[in-house]
Image (cartoon, rainbow, N blue to C red):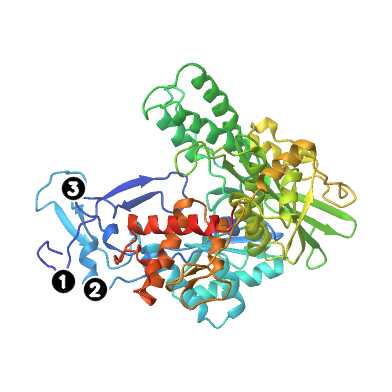
């Protein structure tokens, strides 16, 4: 087309570059279009002018967990998925791009420059993932094969399709049916791969993946021995041993571990990165002294991650519906951070396995929201560990398509178990997290584990690949006979720490009458601030929030009774001003001191 032939209201040109991937078996050279590029810093990019759309993709970690359950896994790829979607004609001019007519003659002349535009949705535009996902979900929801459509819709990520089956015959059947489902949507599945060769015999040889290694959502899957291998990019060449904070961060980002299989190793790198920030290192300042020595040790150890191999199926003894499943969640904390580790326990007949399923680590916060040192005690950090443990338990329960018989959360912190079971009022920090933990009580039970037997200990402190013992990959026997219920009586130190958190503020409730009377009565008034407002003291995290909430209530009451002398201090402004804050402060002072000697 010519530069002057404009058919839409907007005109935009997409910059592009080549990306070469020699390991690809299909498209080794890919042209990438950058819709986030700006002509000038103050200009907007195409992505800035588009709505991203809601996220319709399933959780990536959840998909990875589900594909580790069944004995046989089939994977496929939708051929040129984004290019199956048309762009509305008036909008096509915003996807223009320039191209050399003669690539061997890089001369920028009108005769050597061609102008093209997309008629299909290109990859690289911010709304493309939503458009593709919405289109696929629409076709699946209206397909005649409802069973296959339901299975695929839960296990498709962008253009990657995953199907788990129990037998080769079932896999053969699912290959045919899934291919038919996408054919009716004018989409073609290719690059079929499976750990069982019979399951993919329904596909022609040209439709199957070449080789024994397949990339599954960023993780290498060796179909021959049915194992997984994490990627570990060696971003720093041996000829350039200079390490900076930028290079360290780039290397850390290359350690892709969405399931937390090597969480202790990645946690050590997180701790080191934070130490660089604390030291005030600039992005391109070369590491020296003990910093570079520490990093070289971590780098050498983390490079061993790529040599690790994990079995894809984590419950190899399972057979149909005869097996029973349990989730066991372990949590722990240290001064560096806190962690949770989830294991799937499978029992069939007299055989039992307990394999690592998911892990998550967090650094201990250094400062609170107001910039002051957080002052978090170890029991509070243990509480944070149990909090993310309860979230991980709920996440795994929702993502796994397994009939779980029980979910148990184990912690070595008696203090936290005491808070969870306590009926006494707790401090705001503890009460908020205990409240969240208790919401999982309908499906989650809490138990104590000895500290030396807690597999989450290495995750909360960090470790090297050599520190990952057998107890990390395979949890100890989590049975009631192995770890019976212990006496959870707190020691003197633990009791002292627990009692500090139970010293909730004393509340003096009062009512404020908005009539001319100067005394508070026990009888409710239509223009009275209810005594329930006193709960603000235990629910709000700061005095500022208490005063603002109170001022807002008083402004509402003034709308109801504008001539009340007791509300004369409240301003008529729509916003809360300093005058309103002072009136709220005076009311709390009067209410809490009334009746005192």
Task: Give how far across and how far down residue 519 sits, in percent.
Answer: 50, 67
Residue that sits furthest to the top in the current view? 289
Give the mark nearest the N terminus, 2 or 1.
1
Numbered badge on residue 7: 1
Choose the circle earlier in sequence order: 3 or 2: 3
Measuring from the top left, give residue 342's x and y in whole percent. Answer: 69, 51
Distance from disc 3 to disc 2, alpha carbons, whole Å, reads: 28 Å
Q: Does dot 3 land on a helix, a strand or a loop? A: loop
Along the viewing direction, whichever of 42 and 346 lies nearer the viewer: 42
Q: Is residue 568 left or right of residue 260?
A: left
Residue at label 3? 40
In this rendering, is residue 559 above or below 265? below
The relative height of residue 425 versus residue 304 in the rendered view (above or below) is below
Q: Nearer the viewer, residue 317 or 487?
A: 487
Q: Residues within 10 Å of mark 2 (few under 14, many from 20)?
A: few
Asked which quadrant contains residue 380, the reply is: top right
Q: Which residue is mark 2?
A: 89
For numbered disc 2, what is the local secondary structure? helix
- Circle 3/circle 1 CB separation < 8 Å: no
Q: Are marks 3 and 2 in contact (CB under 8 Å)?
A: no
Q: Nearer the viewer, mark 3 or mark 2?
A: 3
| Comes first in the chain, label 3 or label 1 | 1
Which residue is located at x 68 percent, y 36 percent? 458
């Amino acid at each position: 087309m010519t530069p002057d032939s404009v058919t839409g209201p907007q005109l935009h040109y997409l910059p592009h570059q080549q990306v070469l991937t020699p390991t690809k078996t299909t498209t080794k050279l890919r042209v990438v279009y950058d819709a986030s590029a700006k002509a000038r810093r103050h200009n907007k990019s195409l992505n800035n002018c588009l709505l991203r759309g809601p996220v319709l993709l399933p959780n990536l970690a959840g998909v990875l967990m589900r594909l580790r359950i069944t004995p046989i896994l089939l994977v496929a790829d939708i051929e040129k998925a984004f290019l199956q979607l048309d762009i509305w004609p008036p909008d096509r001019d915003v996807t223009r791009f320039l191209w050399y007519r003669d690539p061997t003659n890089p001369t920028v002349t009108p005769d050597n420059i061609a102008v093209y535009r997309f008629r299909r949705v290109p990859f690289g535009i911010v709304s493309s993932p939503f458009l593709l996902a919405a289109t696929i979900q629409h076709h699946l929801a209206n397909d005649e094969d409802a069973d296959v459509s339901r299975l695929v819709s839960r296990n498709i990520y962008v253009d990657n399709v995953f199907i788990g089956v129990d037998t080769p015959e079932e896999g053969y059947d699912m290959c045919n049916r899934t291919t038919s489902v996408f054919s009716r949507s004018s989409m073609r599945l290719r690059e079929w791969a499976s750990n069982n060769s019979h399951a993919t015999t329904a596909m022609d040889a040209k439709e199957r993946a070449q080789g024994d290694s397949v990339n599954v959502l960023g993780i290498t899957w060796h179909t021959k021995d049915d194992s997984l291998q994490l990627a570990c990019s060696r971003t720093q060449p041996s000829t350039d041993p200079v390490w900076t904070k930028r290079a360290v961060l780039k290397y850390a980002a290359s350690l892709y571990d969405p399931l937390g299989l090597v969480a202790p190793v990645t946690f050590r790198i997180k701790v080191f990165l934070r130490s660089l920030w604390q030291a005030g290192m600039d992005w391109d300042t070369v590491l020296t002294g003990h910093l570079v020595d520490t990093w070289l040790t971590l780098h050498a150890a983390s490079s061993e991650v790529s040599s690790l191999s994990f079995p894809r199926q984590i419950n190899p003894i399972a057979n149909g519906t005869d097996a029973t499943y349990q989730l066991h969640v372990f949590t722990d904390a240290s001064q560096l951070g806190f962690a949770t580790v989830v294991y799937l326990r499978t029992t069939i007949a007299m055989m039992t396995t307990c394999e690592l399923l998911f892990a998550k680590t967090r650094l201990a916060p250094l400062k609170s929201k107001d910039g002051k040192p957080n002052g978090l005690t170890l029991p509070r950090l243990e509480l944070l560990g149990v909090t993310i443990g309860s979230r991980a338990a709920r996440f795994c329960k929702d993502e796994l398509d397994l009939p779980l018989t029980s979910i148990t959360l184990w912690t070595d912190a008696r203090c936290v178990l005491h808070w969870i079971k306590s009926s006494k009022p707790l401090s705001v920090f503890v009460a908020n997290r205990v409240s969240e933990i208790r919401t999982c009580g309908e499906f989650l039970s809490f138990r104590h584990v000895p500290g030396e037997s807690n597999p989450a200990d290495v995750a909360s402190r960090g470790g090297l690949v050599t520190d990952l013992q057998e107890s990390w990959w395979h949890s100890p026997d989590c049975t009631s006979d192995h770890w019976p219920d212990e006496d959870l009586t707190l020691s003197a130190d633990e009791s002292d720490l627990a009692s500090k958190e139970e010293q909730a503020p004393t509340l003096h409730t009062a009512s404020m009458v908005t009539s001319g009377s100067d005394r508070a009565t026990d009888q409710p008034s239509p223009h009275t601030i209810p005594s329930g407002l006193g709960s603000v003291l235990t629910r709000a995290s700061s005095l500022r929030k208490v005063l603002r909430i109170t001022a807002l209530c008083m402004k509402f009451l003034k709308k109801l009774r504008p001539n009340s002398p007791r509300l004369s201090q409240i301003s008529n402004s729509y916003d809360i001003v300093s005058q309103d804050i002072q009136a709220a402060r005076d009311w709390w002072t009067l209410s809490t001191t009334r009746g005192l000697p």
